[in-house]
Image: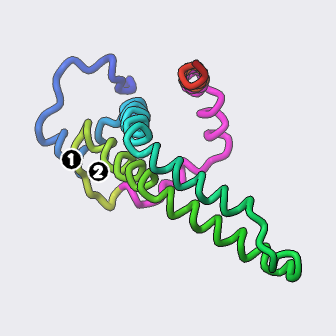
Amino acid sequence: MAEESDLEKTEEATPRRLEKAREEGQVARSQELTTFALLMIAGGALWMLGSSFITSLMEILKRGLQIQPEAHIDSALLPVRLFQHAIDSLIASIPLFAVFFVVAAIAPTLLSGLLFTTKSLIPDFKRLSPIQGFKRIFSMHGFVELVKAIVKQSWLAELLHY
């Protein structure tokens, strides 16, 4: 019996088959859509929130470069100051991280809508084979994905370098 292939199918999927596939968590996904949405919204967020973010980081840097007189006496205060500056930097980053998190959570739903299913959480032990994993990594699809990632990174680096 010949194996079924997407190329051999001539009929459209029935609504029942589409519904069953959706119940199993098999929906259309696009890594490029998520990446594009994240890059565009992140760029907009940096444009809108960047000045306040930079101002906060500059203030933290100024405070960090000022040496307190008690730091000469007690060197145990230095790690405490470093930790406080790290916390302040993290707090200053929260608005940007919140925007990135929301976009990363919403972007995948743009293509296929919101989907909750537990069937995709069931482990598939056939996919845990190291040999099959290496075949997927070093396949033509893996090579194409690597080339796409390199092109994206070089384009982004060129765009940011201007």
Query: 76 or 144, which is in the foreground?
Result: 76
In the picture, the quarter occupied by the C terminus is: top right
Residue 136 lies in the magenta stretch: yes
Please give the name of the residue rendered at 62% of the width and 39% of the height, measured from the top-left corner: 132
What colouring method underlies this structural image? rainbow
Cα separation between marks 1 and 2: 6 Å
Tell me the tag on residue 24. Answer: 2
Question: Does dot 1 land on a helix, a strand or a loop?
Answer: helix
Residue 66 lies, with reference to residue 38, above or below; the image says: below
Residue at 52% across / 50% down in the picture? 55
Please report contact status of discs 1 and 2: CB closer than 8 Å, yes or no: yes
Which residue: 83% across, 81% down? Answer: 76
Q: Is residue 78 left or right of residue 136?
A: right
The circle on residue 34 is: none
State the SS at label 2.
loop
Q: Position of residue 66 (x, y in %)?
A: 74, 63
Residue type at mark 1: give it: Lys
- Residue 89 within the magenta-colored segment of the rendering: no
At label 2, counting other C-alpha atoms closer than 10 Å, the crowd grade (few under 14, some 14-19, many 20 or more) is: some
Q: Position of residue 85 (x, y in %)?
A: 65, 66
Residue corresponding to mark 1: 20
Q: Residue furthest left?
A: 15
Give the residues drawn in magenta, as a range.
Answer: 120-149
Q: Residues within 10 Å of mark 1 (few under 14, many from 20)?
A: few
